[in-house]
Amino acid sequence: MPPAAEAVYVEDPGHGTVREEHGGDGRRRFAALRAPAAAALLTAVLFCLATRLSRTYPFGPVTRNVVDLGQQYLPYHAYWRAFLLGETHGDAFLNWNSGFGSNFLGDIGTYLSSPFDLLVVFFPADRVELALYVVTAVKISAAAAAMALLLLRLRPGPWPVAAVLGTAYALSGWTLDFGATVPMWLDGLVAFPLLCLVGEWARTGRRPVLGPLVVALAWIANFYTAYMATLGAAVVLAVRLLTAEETAGARQRLAGALRAARSVLIGIGLAAPLVVVVFLATKVADPTPETTFAPAPWTDVLARFLPATASVASPALFIGTPALALALTLPFNRAVAPQVRTGWTAAIVLVTLSLQWEPTHLLWHAGASPNGIPYRQTFVLCGLLLIGAWFSAARGVPRPPALLAGVALLGAMAWAARGSVDIDRWTFPALGAAALLALAAVLLARGAGRRSTARVLPVLAVILLVAAQAGEVAVTGKRIEEQQRSEVSWSPRVGPWHATAAVEVARADDWPRHRTDPGEVPGGNDVLLVGGQGADYYSSLTSDVTSRTLASLGFGFYAKGRHPVTLDNPVADALFSVGTRLRSKPTEPVRQDTVPRATVTVTTTPVPPLITVRPPERPATHPGDSAFARQERLLGADVYELPAPRRAGRTLTATCPAGSQVWFWAPEYRGTAALTGERPVEFDGRPPSVRAPMQALGTVPGSGAVRIDLGPEGKVRLPREPVGCLVRARLDSAVRQLTATGATRVRADGHTVTAELPPGSSGVAVLAAPRISGWRCAAGDADARPARAYEGLVAVPLDGRAATVSCSFRPPGIKLGGAVGAAALLALAATGFLHRRRARG
């Protein structure tokens, strides 16, 4: 049997379309890979060059861990590495390290499900920053290769130009300003050209099995940006159906659209086991304040087409001056078929307008205007611009009238944007230099018709084109990184502080007998970086139950509730079975260009077991909604004295038992609070984004007189009961009681916890974990049922006969997602069978 023929795309002269032919050999396959390989290599080099110019790690001493890159994605990749190597206590369902127990499958689908993220296992634990940088660079390079491949499939043309345009797409302003610091979004950057290829296969009736698999992979890798990429690919398919010669008839167009819809539906169905879990987790996540979309001024939108501009309030549209100039020549390029010019120009204009209109803004973002960066879909428009540039340049350099018109339009855009706040001092110098290099490249390319220079001039033209694109990218990447570091929050590099904490956590860890909290380590999501089982947890899927429960007990948070942080409080430690606590003290100031060091101390105290037994709810001696009263209700004992402090100006006075410990709880207070004779303690309440945790101010003197001096920054916001005096003897008695009546043995295996109880236990068994959706429990041999809640924690009713309790966590949606995935798999098999049957017939 002869080998299967390879599909080759050739130009259909006069129509600006392609048709499919068969035949070819290894040389043709190699030629088809030249553009993707060159684009990937060039992209990787330029990305690293921009990093080097900004003196950022790994090519310099300065941290690149700005905003969520350091507080979310770096810690998650550290934990992902440990998980893949079997070094964690939890499993794919449950993460015991974060938030006292969190839905890990949801976090996998949100942050870690990209195939590229598997690369972290090839790096040692102390090189996770390097691993994340490599993952980021590989994703960006893959996007360049995918776009170069797409361009050559849409229309034949010079592969070096396709490679340069692929690089322009991968290193657009969106990538440099947003994607490089939110690595999970980069999967959408890769997905867009791949999904456009799926549309091409559907349009021409090819690859009915591979198409849905590509869709599934895109949605599994990051369904959020895959959704946007799917909308963008639908725009590309619509233009192709209306302008390509192969689908000239209405029936052919309809058939192509239906085949594309089939591929998308089956592909999303295959991804459903993960996508449904993430979707349902977002429904119970801590809600962020609603955001009303406000379109950016058009001067700022135009400015973002230019190099060295950065902003989170306007769309990042930089694709390089040469590529943008080529895209702007498309409407005027008479060498391109009229329907092709009209179709792509209309698509680009309409998508650009859709960025600024609220209904279409909401459509791009699945119905919810996002917090932070409102133009997350901009990579799609960058891709459309580069497709337009390719259609204008694929048949050769546009003629002078088209070039002049495109350059004039570019000049008008730059002139109109000159007053934008986003313009940097490097913007116009970089623009001018790139324009001059691009002009020289055009002149060389147009002079290539002479036989003596037919081979040399095109090569020189490509070199100048690469130089223009490379220079702008390097300058833009450098300036964006420098601006980000100076204007947004940052985390220091991972170093000796984290390593020391990790060693101490590993030495002290005694899970599940009790928890080990690593305390505050610079960055965020500390337990994911150094181990332990603390409260610190930062995720878009942080459960509302977790956030509300911890906040009500005096824990602080960032990110409007989605980042609970540790609380160094002995009552909280007793409630959550935190038996070992680390405390760190930096030995030098923490700076952007240094690796932090610290001394770490370890303290171990007796605490109740992970599962305790409580009597039916009893009246509280201290009623109310203060964190002190809530802690006591959950503990089942009165351990605080709650005075009614008298306020005179910036001073609070009260009376407490001598020797008790003064705790100050003011979640919305920003400033300092100092007990007489003690050092001031800083509080950083900034509602609604930041909630300050309760903190100890010192010990009550023998007189029992308590005087607290406040140093507020702005208006003083205090709750009704801001002061609690902890009597340690009462707490010790409560701990002994809960230990005596609690579980005699606890076992935690992945997402399941089992415990043996003292004979005759009655009341309520309480697992020291927030009662998030997905917990099911049983007492003795009874059937497992959805867990009940006891002051926000997982609870199991006891009747005095059960000697054991067991609780298991299953992410909501996994059954529904599995059923949808199985149906999609059957549909894919049927599609493949029918296609093969038609091919044989």
Image (cartoon, rainbow, N blue to C red):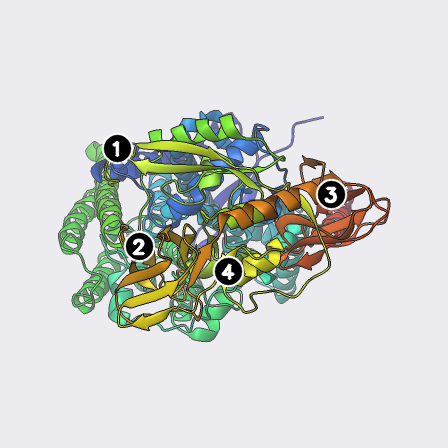
In the picture, the quarter occupied by the C terminus is: top right
Q: Label 3: few (<14), some or many (≥20) within 10 Å?
A: few
In the picture of the structure, the residue carrying the numbered disc 4 is 628
Count of numbered marks: 4
Spatial separation of the CA atoms under disc 3 and disc 4: 73 Å
SS category of the residue bearing label 2: strand
Q: Earlier in the sequence, mark 3 or mark 4?
A: 4
Q: Earlier in the sequence, mark 1 or mark 3?
A: 1
The correct choice, above or below, for 124 with respect to 675 in the image is above
Closer mark to the observer between disc 2 and disc 3: 2
In the picture of the structure, the residue carrying the numbered disc 3 is 839
Q: Pinpoint residue 342: horizontal percent, then vertical percent.
A: 41, 66
Q: Amino acid at mark 3?
A: Ala
Residue 213 is left or right of residue 563, and the answer is right
Residue 455 disc label: 1
Q: Pinpoint residue 619: horizontal percent, then vertical percent.
A: 65, 66
Residue 666 is left or right of residue 711, and the answer is right
Q: Earlier in the sequence, mark 2 or mark 3?
A: 2
Q: Amino acid at mark 1?
A: Arg
Spatial separation of the CA atoms under disc 4 and disc 2: 20 Å
Q: Pinpoint residue 573: horizontal percent, then vertical percent.
A: 53, 45
Q: Earlier in the sequence, mark 4 or mark 1?
A: 1
Residue 682 disc label: 2
Closer mark to the observer between disc 3 and disc 4: 4
Residue nearest the viewer, comparing 551 with 383: 551
Q: Earlier in the sequence, mark 4 or mark 2?
A: 4
